[in-house]
């Protein structure tokens, strides 16, 4: 089994600070670190002990974290949580899948439907009508107990990565797309994109993802459609890098307003390491309208690092700072 990205980074970092790294030989994402001063810590993939357990658990729950963000005065999407029938009976609420549809209608389509506690953009879907709503909601409830219906907001998608009171990394996230050449079908273009992502060590695109077919249909396209030369076709709405999205690095150009916003959110949410996901027009200019769509207490950075040596070095620098913070 190939050494996981996070472990390869940690192997270099612990050497710099004189720590000792032990990795489970079977589950290579799990390990133990002993610092030079005798302190010890554990990690699982990108989950470190730097965030308190309670704060980390709240960050995982999109409904709870949205409530707290709104309480502290931050702008979040208008939305409500809905649950499967078993949980509705247990907590004595009528917010079931049908109530979710009524709420979606009241917001006005399109809306965002997303799981309460899944990561990497899994099943986060922009739905346009009743049929799509029930298709997505049922898929979510097959694997988790609840989902959120949110108002859809137009804008660019950004991630700001904060450690304590410092913004370490900032980038814009672009949804998965293909560029036509006048000869190849969408399917062929996606296969080539897949090979390119794999070459860079990135996650495999799920070509069976129902959201891709839906996105193409709304553009009156199919997998067999041939795209004109230099025409860009977006095949997903969500911009997660783990779904094949692209990153535009803005670490050096993020405006101070947004840096302050992300740092304040990190402190208010009781976190130290967090990825703050924001929808706004331009993160390099003074802050205007914005929406906080999520806070991620264990942000994965392998996909970001794949964009070049500078990005890899930034990730290594981040994990060096994380370990130094835990040691001291």
Image (cartoon, grey):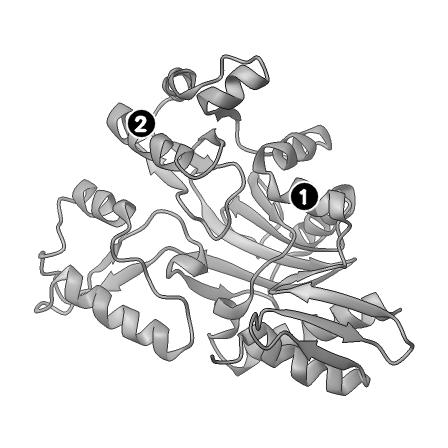
* Local SS, label 1: helix
Is residue 70 left or right of 164 when viewed as pictured? left
Percent x, y of residue 251: 60, 66
Frontmost residue, 76 versus 114: 114
* Front position in the image: 16 or 158: 16
Residue name at image x 39 percent, y 35 percent: 142
For marks 2 and 1 on the same chain, the one whose residue lies earlier in the sequence: 1
Is 47 rendered above or below residue 252?
above
Q: Which mark is residue 57?
A: 1
Q: Which residue is mark 2?
A: 134
User: Where is residue 50 drawn, in percent x and y?
Assistant: 77, 59
Picture residue at 47% right of the left edge, 75% below the top: 306
Cα distance, mark 2 to mark 1? 28 Å
SS at circle 2: helix
Q: Position of residue 55 (x, y in %)?
A: 73, 44
Could you say which disc has been placed on residue 3 in the image?
Answer: none
* Quarter of image, res 25: bottom right
Q: How many marks?
A: 2
């Amino acid at each position: 089994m190939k050494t996981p990205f996070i472990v390869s980074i940690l192997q270099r970092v612990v050497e710099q600070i004189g720590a000792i790294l032990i990795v489970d030989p079977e589950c290579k994402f799990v390990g133990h670190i002993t610092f030079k001063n005798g302190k010890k810590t554990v990690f699982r993939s990108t989950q470190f002990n730097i965030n308190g357990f309670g704060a980390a658990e709240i960050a995982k729950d999109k409904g709870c974290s949205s409530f707290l963000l709104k309480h502290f005065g931050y702008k979040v999407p208008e939305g409500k949580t809905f649950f499967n029938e078993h949980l509705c009976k247990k907590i004595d609420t009528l917010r079931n899948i049908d109530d979710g549809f009524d709420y979606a209608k009241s917001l006005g389509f399109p809306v965002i439907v997303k799981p309460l506690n899944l990561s990497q953009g899994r099943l986060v879907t922009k739905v346009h009508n009743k049929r799509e709503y029930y298709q997505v909601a049922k898929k979510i409830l097959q694997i988790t107990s609840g989902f959120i219906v949110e108002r859809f907001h137009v804008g660019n998608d950004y991630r700001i990565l904060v450690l304590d009171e410092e913004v370490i990394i900032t980038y814009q996230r672009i949804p998965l797309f293909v560029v036509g050449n006048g000869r190849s079908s969408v399917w062929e273009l996606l296969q080539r994109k897949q090979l390119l992502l794999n070459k860079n060590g990135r996650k495999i695109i799920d070509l069976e993802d129902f959201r891709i077919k839906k996105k193409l249909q709304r553009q009156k396209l199919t997998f067999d459609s041939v795209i004109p030369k230099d025409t860009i076709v977006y095949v997903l709405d969500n911009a997660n890098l783990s779904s094949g999205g692209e990153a535009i690095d803005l670490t050096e150009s993020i405006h101070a307003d947004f840096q302050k916003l992300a740092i304040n959110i990190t402190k208010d949410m009781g976190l130290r390491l967090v990825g703050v996901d924001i929808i706004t027009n331009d993160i390099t200019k003074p802050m205007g309208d914005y929406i906080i769509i999520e806070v991620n207490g264990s942000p994965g950075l392998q996909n970001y690092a794949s964009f070049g040596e500078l990005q890899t070095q930034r990730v290594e620098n981040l994990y060096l700072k994380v370990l130094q913070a835990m040691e001291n």
